[in-house]
Image (cartoon, rainbow, N blue to C red):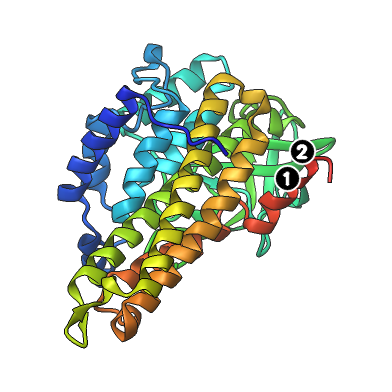
């Protein structure tokens, strides 16, 4: 794979994001939030919105900066390095991309609220242990001019605290995407504690009323709206996981330079040097895949699926390798809760499953290659 490089503007964005996140959301803050029982930092999200991150994919006409998918991936990657907790992926990337597919005043108003940081979203798709939108069984039955939604969703990231929920349900002749407030009658949310200390929920819909205005896009044609949003979310999640890999790698290299054995820094041992070099190469190649996915989403969105799935599959494997090597090279302390490497490992495990695991995306790539 040819090594892609960031543009000057993307480099400046990354440097700006790095400077902000190192101060506002260091890894240590995640431990403080966890110990305090917090799964969301509203103040941090407000700062991000004030910096324009919430509107990175919102058109300028709706108050956003509309910097594009490659820029969103740059921000996500930097957030991954410090394991920053925010609704950036679910709201600024997934929901904003879905709303961009609809040209009406309601969608424009919703995008404006996302850009200002006044509303957050969650995506409710998963019903089983694996990501599979085509297998959704939740029912949306006709009721006059509207629908009644009944069913359960799980692994709804940011679902406990989101203001609104994008819900995928099965209608008469296909799948339909609904945009409903999270506090609507019949919606009940059960917080689900994830190992990486982020917010998630199990959501039950009991005869929930949905009008025609709640339909995002066209009835029975959810994927026209949802597919671009999933691609964008998967690419940004892959970028976050690659940032995670880089963060874990940096921590590991620092330790190799400091820890001494037999009076010598262990980073001088050739076997460890080889392992570190191999991991660095894997991160660099995966970074190229992330950049390619962002370019494809910006320039050829209809043909971006394979690039996105390749990026997510590679990012998953690279993140797992990075945290495994990090724990092993740190020795016994790598497994202790007092050390930050464990947070990287937990986030990598959750990211590997969200929006499709390695097998899911490897199958997508295989289909595009004709296998």
Front-most of 213 and 296? 296
Q: Is residue 5 left or right of residue 136?
A: left
The reply to whether residue 317 is in sight is yes
Front-most of 116 and 24? 24
> The residue tagged with tag 1: helix, strand or loop?
helix
Residue where numbered disc 1 is placed: 364
Residue where numbered disc 2 is placed: 368
Locate residue 129: give its quadrant.
bottom right
Q: Residue 137 in the image: x percent, y percent?
A: 76, 52
**As drawn, which residue projects farthest toward the top?**
61
How packed mark 2 is, by other alpha carbons closer than 10 Å (few <14, some 14-19, many 20 or more), is few
| For the residues bearing labels 1 and 2, Cβ distance under 8 angstroms | yes
Q: Is residue 150 left or right of residue 124?
A: right
How packed mark 1 is, by other alpha carbons closer than 10 Å (few <14, some 14-19, many 20 or more), is some
Task: Give the residue drawn at x 19%, y 49%.
Answer: 22
Q: Residue 173 in the image: x percent, y percent?
A: 84, 35
Q: Residue 118 in the image: x percent, y percent?
A: 32, 33
Locate residue 61: give its quadrant.
top left
């Amino acid at each position: 794979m040819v090594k892609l490089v960031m543009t000057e503007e993307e480099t400046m964005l990354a440097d700006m994001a790095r400077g902000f996140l190192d101060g506002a959301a260091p890894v240590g803050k995640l431990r403080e939030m966890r110990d305090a029982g917090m799964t969301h930092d509203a103040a941090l999200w407000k700062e991000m919105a004030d910096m324009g991150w919430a509107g990175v994919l919102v058109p300028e006409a709706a108050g956003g900066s509309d910097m594009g998918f490659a820029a969103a991936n740059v921000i996500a990657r930097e957030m991954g390095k410090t394991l920053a907790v925010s609704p950036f992926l679910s709201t600024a990337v997934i929901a904003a991309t879905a709303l961009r597919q609809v040209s009406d005043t309601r969608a424009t108003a919703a995008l404006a609220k996302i850009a200002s940081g006044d509303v957050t979203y969650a995506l409710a798709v998963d019903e089983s242990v694996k990501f599979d939108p085509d297998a959704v069984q939740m029912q949306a039955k006709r009721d006059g001019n509207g629908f009644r939604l009944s069913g359960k969703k799980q692994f709804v990231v940011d679902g406990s605290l989101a203001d609104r929920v994008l819900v995928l349900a099965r209608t008469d002749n296909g799948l339909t995407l609904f945009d409903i407030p999270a506090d609507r009658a019949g919606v009940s949310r059960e917080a689900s504690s994830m190992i990486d200390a982020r917010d998630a929920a199990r959501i039950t819909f009991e005869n929930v009323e949905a009008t025609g205005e709640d339909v995002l896009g066209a009835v029975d044609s959810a994927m026209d709206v949802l597919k671009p949003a999933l691609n964008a979310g998967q690419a940004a999640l892959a970028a976050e996981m690659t940032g995670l890999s880089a963060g874990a790698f940096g921590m590991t290299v620092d330790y190799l330079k400091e820890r001494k054995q037999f009076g010598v820094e262990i980073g001088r041992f050739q076997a460890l040097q080889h392992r570190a070099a191999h991991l660095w190469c894997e991160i660099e190649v995966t970074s190229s895949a992330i950049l390619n996915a962002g370019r494809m989403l910006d320039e050829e969105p209809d043909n971006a699926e394979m690039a996105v799935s390749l990026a997510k599959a590679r990012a998953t494997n690279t993140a797992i390798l990075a945290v495994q090597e990090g724990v092993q090279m740190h020795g016994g302390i790598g497994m202790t809760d007092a050390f930050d490497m464990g947070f990287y490992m937990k986030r990598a495990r959750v990211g590997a499953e969200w929006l499709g695991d390695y097998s899911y995306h490897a199958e997508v790539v295989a289909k595009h290659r004709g296998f």
